[in-house]
Image (cartoon, helix red, strand yellow):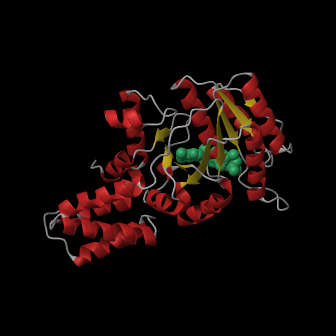
Amino acid sequence: MSFFKRMFGRTEDAPRTEEEAQQEEQQVEQSLEKSRQGIFGRISKMFATDEPITEELWDELEEALILGDVGVETTMYLVNRTKDRCNRHGVKKAREAREMLKAEMVRTFQEYAGRQAVNAKPYVILVVGVNGAGKTTLIAKLAHRYKTRLGKRVLLAAGDTFRAAATEQLETWAERADVPIISLGQGADAGAVVYKALDTAFEQDFDVLIIDTAGRLQAKFNLMQELEKLRNIIRRRVPDAPHEVLLVIDATTGQNGVLQAKAFLKTADITDVAVTKMDGTAKGGIAFAIAQDIERPIRYLGTGEKIDNLALFESQAFVDALFAEN
Ligand SMILES: Nc1nc2c(ncn2[C@@H]2O[C@H](COP(=O)(O)OP(=O)(O)OP(=O)(O)O)[C@@H](O)[C@H]2O)c(=O)[nH]1
Ligand SMILES: [Mg+2]
């Protein structure tokens, strides 16, 4: 990791030691194994020649990217920009065009790169997303990260009071991460949980409060209205909170998952995105569709089911890993 990245990394992210950064890069590379064996390996090979670029090659690229879950619109955007870049740089050989493609891919992610760091105590993170996206698991990973890497005192709030066993699941994870949790059990008012958690965070001087939310409610409740209500409760207590609203998207759900996730944009004031289960898909291209469609920075990658299977998202490292030769 370069000195620059470290300087400009958000305070909550830093510091990562060189070793930790490398471990995360390795995790990302491993989690993209299936993608490399699939479409991205194919793309890499298509361009692994000193032959001149042909229209046919661009068509093949287009087709491959769409198969790789990049999405039609983002694919057209990427291919057109890559062609332009090749023209601008006088690139004629396929092998060189591959580098142009990679550069455009990196740029796609950077369009929505990071906002300013917020120094707040407690730093309140609201985690949202459709059911099964990986919210609860991600919360455990974040808690673990804040605690072990950054030495922060973390409190969890079991705000998913609807799904049976949701609170128990978070309690189990809290135990594994060795952090306390505020829970009022299933059926309780999620607002009451959040209220109590905020009180506790202030009283006991916690650094970070991470709030779990429901992914699906009973038919008579509207999920977006509930989230809005939670936000209002948080805001009334801490006017500039939540400081981070993290939208969790399951990489394996493809274009449909992105579409569903978009529903959260309107109500939930999303600040950042976490893409989970990257290890479970051969279509890592979904990350590009997410970046373009959600228009927020991808902050984290879930690379497995264990508590430390979490990596900070680095656009260059991600693209390099997609094309890595092994
Ligand atoms: N392979 C893999 N599995 C993951 C990852 N993140 C989460 N999972 C799995 O995805 C499943 C759903 O995860 P949860 O964290 O329960 O998802 P959720 O969004 O809280 O789900 P609801 O509470 O039902 O809304 C679990 O089986 C997790 O182990 C990941 O990065 N990689
Ligand atoms: Mg959950």
- Indicate the quadrant where residue 307 lies: top right
Percent from the top left, x then y, of residue 285? Answer: 43, 60
Is 274 or 325 nearer to us in this picture?
Answer: 274
Up/down of 135 relative to 20, above or below:
below
Farthest residue to the front: give it.
Answer: 239
**Residue located at (54% from left, 31% from top):** 145
- Indicate the quadrant where residue 155 lies: top right
Q: Is residue 282 in view? A: no
**Residue located at (54% from left, 24% from top):** 148
- Indicate the quadrant where residue 249 lies: bottom right
**Residue located at (52% from left, 25% from top):** 150
Percent from the top left, x then y, of residue 15? Answer: 44, 28
Report the label total: 0
**Relative to 304, 161 lies left or right:** right
Up/down of 315 relative to 223, above or below:
above
Q: Is residue 94 in view? A: yes
Percent from the top left, x then y, of residue 171? Answer: 73, 33
Q: Quadrant of the N terminus?
A: top left
Percent from the top left, x then y, of residue 233? Answer: 78, 44
**Residue located at (25% from left, 60% from top):** 100
Farthest residue to the bottom: give it.
Answer: 55
